Image: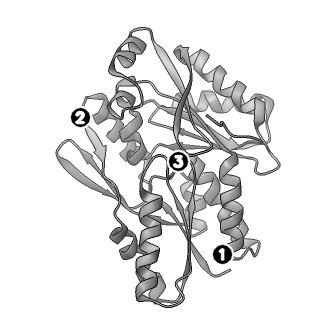
Amino acid sequence: MNYEIFADVSIDIDKKFAEENQVRYVPMEYMLGEDSFPCTEPESDEMMHNYYEKLRNKIPTHTSQIVPNHYVEIFEPYIQEGKSILYLSLSSGLSNTYESALMAVQMLQEDYDNVNIEVVDSLGATGGMGLLTESACANRDAGMSLTENAAWLREKAYYVNLWFKVEDLMYLSRGGRISTATAILGTALNLNPILTVDSTGHLQTVDKKRGNRQAFRNLIERFEENFDPAVSNVVYISCADCMEDAATLKEMVLESHPGLTIRITMLSPIIGAHTGPDMISLIYYGTTKYQG
């Protein structure tokens, strides 16, 4: 079917798959120290290692919100060519990208006839968007129309599980996810909070474990509880420059599910700015999703 598939550049996705399936990106921007950097496509692992090394050296980082005009500038050339667009956004519970994209569609409809854009709220982030984008490409190749594909994705977004743990609690504190006192105490006690993105697309803290070993076991237990291979045998492990930990988590998954395709990706700077270095996540289609 002839429509373009877009995703926020905050996505974590297998780069080869994305290139082969002509996935397109909505660029974003991040700050590192006093400098601003455009992010137009998923960065190389080498570049991301350098980025996280700077964060480890306490160089501050943050991101900015996307305004509707940004989407208009990205989508308009395709509309002028008569093309249709399927766009997967970062969760509406984590960012205003979804709302900005919807506003951009309305703006384009005022200037052009037959604007055909489907905006899908991923209700997730990182590899969760990667999973949905892979499915979107497969659905397109199987002959699903734009409308059918968008409806399928909206339904399945409620079943994408994203479990992760962070290393530096101060990043969550700065983002208002936990208090400064909790962050300081947790760091002193070597506690790793286990977090998820719930069925409404919001971030939730669900547990706390001391050290990596217990945290990883917790992620695996949650995976075993509701993994649904009937939807997809692809599992994403997105990490913030902790590839050895990602390899360990991959082996733990494969011990009981040797036939799965495990994609290890480096966390984008857009999301990494809010989690800090050494975050690691386990992402898959489940039979249920955390309700909060």
Q: How packed is label 1: few (under 14 Cα within 10 Å), some, or many (20 or more)?
A: many
Query: Mark 2 or mark 1, which is nearer to you?
Result: 1
Marking on residue 54: none
Front residue of this view, candidates 180 and 76: 180
Name the spot of residue 241 as percent of width and height, x first: 44, 35
Amino acid residing under circle 2:
Ile
Secondary structure, mark 1, is helix
What residue is pinned by disc 1? Answer: 146
Name the spot of residue 9 as percent of width and height, x first: 44, 57
Secondary structure, mark 3, is loop
Front residue of this view, candidates 249 and 108: 108
Q: Is residue 12 left or right of residue 134?
A: left
The mark that comes first in sequence, 3 or 2, is 2
Q: Is residue 157 above or below residue 197?
A: below
The mark that comes first in sequence, 3 or 1, is 3
Q: Is residue 105 above or below residue 174?
A: below
**Residue contact between numbered discs 3 and 2, judged by CB atoms under 8 Å:** no
Spatial CA distance of label 2 from label 1 is 43 Å
> What residue is rendered at 53% in x and 32% in y?
204
Secondary structure, mark 2, is loop
Q: How packed is label 3: few (under 14 Cα within 10 Å), some, or many (20 or more)?
A: many
What residue is pinned by disc 2? Answer: 59
> What residue is rendered at 43% in x and 81% in y?
108
What residue is pinned by disc 3? Answer: 125
Spatial CA distance of label 3 from label 1 is 22 Å
Q: Is residue 197 left or right of residue 229?
A: left
Amino acid residing under circle 3:
Ala
